[in-house]
Amino acid sequence: MKLLLIADTHLPKRARDLPAEVWSAVDDADVVIHAGDWVNLAAFEELSQRSRRLVTCWGNNDGEELRALMPERADVVLGGVRFTVVHETGASTGRERRMAAAYPETDVLVFGHSHIPWDTFADSGLRLLNPGSPTDRRRQPFCTYMTAVAEDGALKEVNVHRIAPR
């Protein structure tokens, strides 16, 4: 099962649209996971229509209209892997320990908010993934997104993709 992980799209405030390579990844993915901060209902609707399956949550910049359509936390099993999707996880210091305690039944926690790509493991085995942002690099050298494969209860081929500056 091919996965696309994105977060913090902030459309249309940070960009008018997703980069073409992200739309191509949407078309290739079996499941798109978006970890919040859509900002715009039209962006959510377009990604919903174009995705084979969309798993998402709302972020701190998402208003009531978006919050009415999605949960603050999404839990799903994909390819035998238990995922939780949230927007915020707090400070980076101690994140793995805090998240392992908060999500003991989760194999992979996908989160956003910082716009910083993140791929680490907690001592419990919980994997924490932040795909960064495909539209707003902030202090990062590149805008980013992630792809992965979930099958037979394992997450494989996790890759961070850098988007070339426009």
Image (cartoon, rainbow, N blue to C red):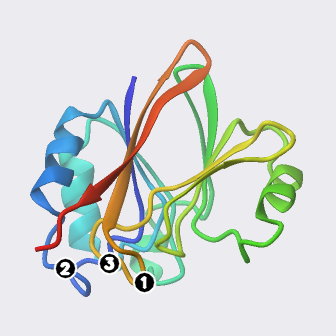
Left or right of residue 35: residue 52: left
CB-based contact (under 8 Å), mark 2 and mark 1: no
| Residue 136 circle label | 3
| Quarter residue 10 falls in | bottom left
Q: Secondary structure at mark 3?
A: loop
- Outermost front residue: 141
Q: Amino acid at mark 3?
A: Asp
- Identify the residue at image location x=85%, y=43%: 104
Residue named by callout 1:
139
- Identify the residue at image location x=60%, y=64%: 72
Residue named by callout 2:
15
| Residue 106 circle label | none
Q: Quadrant of the C terminus?
A: bottom left
Q: Nearer the viewer, mark 2 or mark 1?
A: 1
Left or right of residue 37: residue 106: right
In the image, 152 versus 62, the foreground residue is 152
How many numbered marks appear?
3
